[in-house]
Each structure stands twice: as structure tokens, then as C-alpha cells.
């Protein structure tokens, strides 16, 4: 049976991309956002191929490249004094399979532009969901506090994309969010500083138990994300006071405050957590509402975008009569399995690589013992395809034969393109 409406709670990157995929396929979608606008802060945003594919399917990729950039040099690992430990040569990685960079604030602005042109999509700001109900078998409901008082919204399915503190997840499972919190404290900053002139390129990790860090170009205009380890338990003001000395220690050239322009500073704890289920009846979870991981390696954002791409295929399959409701149980099984077997262990190892004494790491860590492989462009091209394992093709689980599904998919793709041309 065709889906009449989907409600998405939370207009972050995952929620907005899912809304656009659904709207492009002719499904009516409402986005309920608690804030009065989309978050426009220049948070770190890097997209490997699995995420790039979802941006392409949503019709965003050409503008993502225009407004952002495609990484042209490989990441390096360094000691805190800048000594090079290893560098990855990405020269043989195809252009479309390289990391794409665009801050989340700009990605959200882009998705909003597209959603505003879709007559079957609407973002409702200042709509804070307070409770849920699925007592009716034919629909699910949420109750939202709005400028006009409490309102009730109902849909065939409701998707929680409302972040780490998800109201939808809490309504389904209470305070339980299985997993763990790292002992380490992270401070994330955005800063204008000419890192490139020191030969560090577009991205570098610092390996050090005390001063581990990521330094990565965010925007073509020279804005960098610098995320570094800090003492646990300080106030935001204390972290801010310590920031100049941290930059002097970890950034090339040992800059003082007069040498850079600090844009933002945000301390936060990091977690590895996964909800008990990504589906309860007509309620579904995706992205940070469903699972969390530390930011080193970008698997949180990537995993969230792949979640919503997979969920779109499941919902669109139901909408087109190519799958029944049970495919959403498969969504839960597959996405939890991808988190537990790939995203959690790989992202955890990414951080552990940085928490070592660098001299010990050079002798004992398999990553640095394989430096020759990292210098081999062809070997690196094969290595970076490993992240593709977090992907899954749900169209192959549709009820029709493969041949029928392929032909139907072609027809749907043609219809979606025609709709885009007509509306844009």
C-alpha cells in the first residue's frame, strides 16, 4: 500500500537527506525541528564514498562539489612536534571515490534549498516533540510543543533523526542507550590558520597520549577543524583559557593568538553506543538517534547518511508495492549489524591509533608497520574501499524478481528525474 506520509523528527543532515530522498520519490514528508532554524555552524564534514553515493542519489552532489571540495592529498600521521610518521598516497583513488568536504551547516543550507522547492516536503520549525503514541494500528503519532500550543501529527511511519539525546529513542527505550563513554575529553575548534604552508596538507592526525588531535581543512577559504584531547572535568571557560597553549603545542609553527582567527570552541565527551532496536512498530531510528561513535574517521556522519539511504530504499519499496512492512525489520537487523561489526570497532581503533606513544606505535602498531603500503597508490586505492562494507542494497530484497526490480527501478528513476526537472 502506498505511503501517505512520513514524519521525520530532527532536521539535521540525516533527517534532511532522508526527507529529500522521500520527497523526490513522491512521498509526502514533514520535518519537525525543535529549533527556529537549521544549524548553520561550520561543523566538521567529510564524506567518503558511501556518504557521497547518498548525496548523489538525493541530487545534491554537483552542488556539494561546487560549494565544498574534493580532497586532493592524503592524510598524514605526525608526532606532536610535527615529525612525519606516515602519509597516505591517494593519487590512484578515483576522483568520485575520494573524500568530499563540505561543512554540515552548508550541507543543511543546500538541502533546505532543495526541500523548499518540493511541494510534498515541509520543515516545521519550533516543533519540539514531547511524547509519542502508536496505539492506532494504521498510523503513528507524535505530540509537539509549537508556537500555537501542543499539536498532534500522525503519519504511516515516524523516523527519529533527532540526535544523541533523541526524544524518540527515549520515548521508546527510556534512558537506556547501551554502550560506553570514552575516558578521553575532546575539544573541537574551527580556526583560520595557514596550516598548508607548513607542509601538513589538507589533513593530519597527531599521535600522542596527551595531545592527540585531528587537523583538517573544512573549507576552501582556509577554515580548519582542529579537534584535540584535553584534561577531563574542566569547565568550558577553563578549556577556553587553555586553548592558546594547546594550539602552540600541536599546530605547526607554534602559533600564538595573533597568528590565527578562532571561530568556535566546543568541548564534548565521546561515546560508542547503539540502541536496542532501530524499529519499534511504526517508529524508526537512524543516525545519531540510533548509534554513536567517536569522530575520528568520520564514521558517525557517514554511518548516519547510509542509514537514511537504506531506510529510504525500504520505505520506497513499501510505497511502490515492491516490499512489505517486514523489510523494516531487515533495516533494523542490517544497520545494527553494520554498526556492531564495522562502525564501532573501526572507529574505536581509529582513536586508539592516536592515543599511543608515537615511538612505541612506530614499532608495534600494525598501521605504522605497513607504511610502505600507505605509500603505494594502488594499495591505498584498494584499502579505502573497505569502508564500502557499511553499505547494503535493500532493493535486492524486494519481493519481485531481480529483472522486474531492475526495470521498475529504471522507471522510478526516470519519474524522479522528470519530477526534479519540473520542480527545479
Image (cartoon, rainbow, N blue to C red):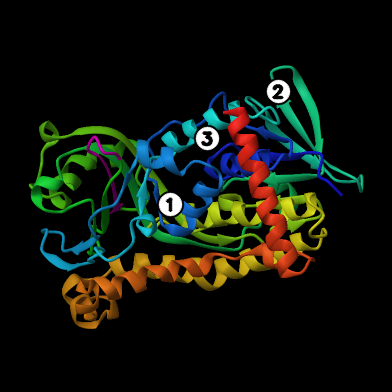
Which one is in front, 226 or 69? 69
Task: Tell me the residue at 69%/18% (across/down).
Answer: 147
Of 13 and 242, the residue lying toward us: 13
Bounds of the magenta segment: 219-230
| Residue 79, placed above or below residue 413 | below
Kindly indicate the quadrant of the structure image that contains residue 203.
bottom left
Location of residue 353 by image quarter: bottom left
Please say whether residue 162 is visible from this viewpoint: no
Query: Closest to the observer: 102 or 233?
Result: 102
Q: Quadrant of residue 212?
A: bottom left
* Circle 1 crowding by C-alpha within 10 Å: few under 14, some 14–19, many from 20: few
Q: Which residue is mark 2?
A: 146
User: In this view of the protein, which residue sits in the foreground, 93 or 127?
Assistant: 93
SS assignment for the magenta stretch, majority: strand
Whole-angstrom CA distance, mark 1 to mark 2, is 31 Å
Query: How far from the left and from the top, in percent, is residue 370?
Result: 24, 80
What is the x, y in percent for residue 173? 72, 54
Query: Picture coordinates of residue 409 (x, y %)?
Result: 68, 55
Label 1: which secondary element: strand
**Which numbered disc flags the more N-terminal residue, 1 or 2?**
2
- For marks 1 and 2, give the one nearer the viewer: 2
Disc sitting over residue 111 in the figure: 3
Residue that appears at 58% across and 33% down: 421
In the image, what residue occupies the spot 47% across and 31% down?
109
Q: CA distance from mark 3 to mark 1?
A: 28 Å
Q: Label 3, label 2: how many angstroms apart (C-alpha)?
A: 23 Å
Question: What numbered label is drawn on residue 269?
Answer: 1
Ranked by sequence position, the earlier of labels 3 and 2 is: 3
Amino acid at each position: 500500500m502506498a505511503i501517505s506520509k512520513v514524519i521525520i523528527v530532527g532536521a539535521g543532515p540525516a533527517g534532511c537527506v532522508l526527507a529529500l530522498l522521500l520527497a523526490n520519490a513522491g512521498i509526502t514528508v514533514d520535518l519537525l525541528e525543535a529549533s527556529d532554524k537549521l544549524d548553520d555552524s561550520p561543523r566538521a564534514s567529510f564524506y567518503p564514498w558511501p556518504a557521497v553515493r547518498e548525496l548523489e542519489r538525493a541530487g545534491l552532489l554537483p552542488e556539494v562539489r561546487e560549494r565544498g571540495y574534493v580532497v586532493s592529498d592524503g592524510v598524514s600521521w605526525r608526532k606532536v612536534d610535527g615529525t612525519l610518521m606516515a602519509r597516505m598516497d591517494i593519487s590512484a583513488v578515483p576522483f568520485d571515490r575520494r573524500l568530499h568536504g563540505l561543512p554540515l551547516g552548508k550541507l543543511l543550507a543546500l538541502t533546505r534549498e532543495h526541500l523548499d522547492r518540493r511541494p510534498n516536503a515541509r520543515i516545521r520549525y519550533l516543533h519540539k516533540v514531547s511524547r509519542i503514541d502508536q496505539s492506532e494500528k494504521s498510523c503513528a503519532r507524535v505530540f509537539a510543543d509549537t508556537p500555537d500550543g501542543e499539536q498532534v501529527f500522525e503519519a504511516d511511519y515516524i523516523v527519529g533523526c533527532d540526535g544523541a539525546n533523541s526524544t524518540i529513542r527515549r520515548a521508546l527505550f527510556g534512558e537506556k542507550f547501551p554502550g560506553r563513554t570514552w575516558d578521553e575529553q575532546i575539544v573541537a575548534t574551527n580556526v583560520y590558520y595557514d596550516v598548508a604552508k607548513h607542509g601538513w596538507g589538507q589533513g593530519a592526525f597527531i599521535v600522542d597520549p596527551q595531545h592527540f588531535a585531528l587537523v583538517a581543512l573544512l573549507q576552501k577559504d582556509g577554515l580548519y577543524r582542529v579537534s584535540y584531547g584535553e584534561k577531563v572535568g574542566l569547565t568550558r571557560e577553563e578549556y577556553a583559557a587553555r586553548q592558546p597553549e594547546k594550539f602552540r603545542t600541536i599546530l605547526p609553527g607554534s602559533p600564538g593568538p595573533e597568528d590565527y582567527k578562532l571561530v568556535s570552541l566546543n568541548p564534548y565527551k565521546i561515546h560508542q553506543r547503539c540502541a536496542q532496536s532501530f524499529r519499534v512498530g511504526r517508529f524508526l531510528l537512524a543516525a545519531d538517534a540510533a548509534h554513536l561513535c567517536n569522530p575520528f574517521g568520520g564514521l558517525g556522519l557517514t554511518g548516519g547518511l547510509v542509514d537514511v539511504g537504506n531506510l529510504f530504499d525500504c520505505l520506497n519499496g513499501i510505497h511502490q508495492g515492491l516490499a512489505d512492512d517486514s523489510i523494516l525489520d531487515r533495516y533494523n537487523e542490517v544497520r545494527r549489524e553494520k554498526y556492531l561489526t564495522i562502525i564501532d570497532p573501526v572507529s574505536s581503533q581509529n582513536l586508539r591509533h592516536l592515543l599511543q606513544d608515537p615511538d612505541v606505535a612506530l614499532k608495534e602498531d600494525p598501521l605504522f608497520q605497513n607504511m610502505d603500503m600507505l605509500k603505494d597508490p594502488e594499495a591505498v586505492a584498494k584499502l579505502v574501499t573497505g569502508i564500502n562494507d557499511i553499505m547494503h542494497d535493500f532493493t535486492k530484497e524486494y519481493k519481485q524478481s531481480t529483472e522486474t526490480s531492475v526495470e521498475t527501478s529504471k522507471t522510478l528513476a526516470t519519474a524522479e528525474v522528470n519530477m526534479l526537472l519540473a520542480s527545479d
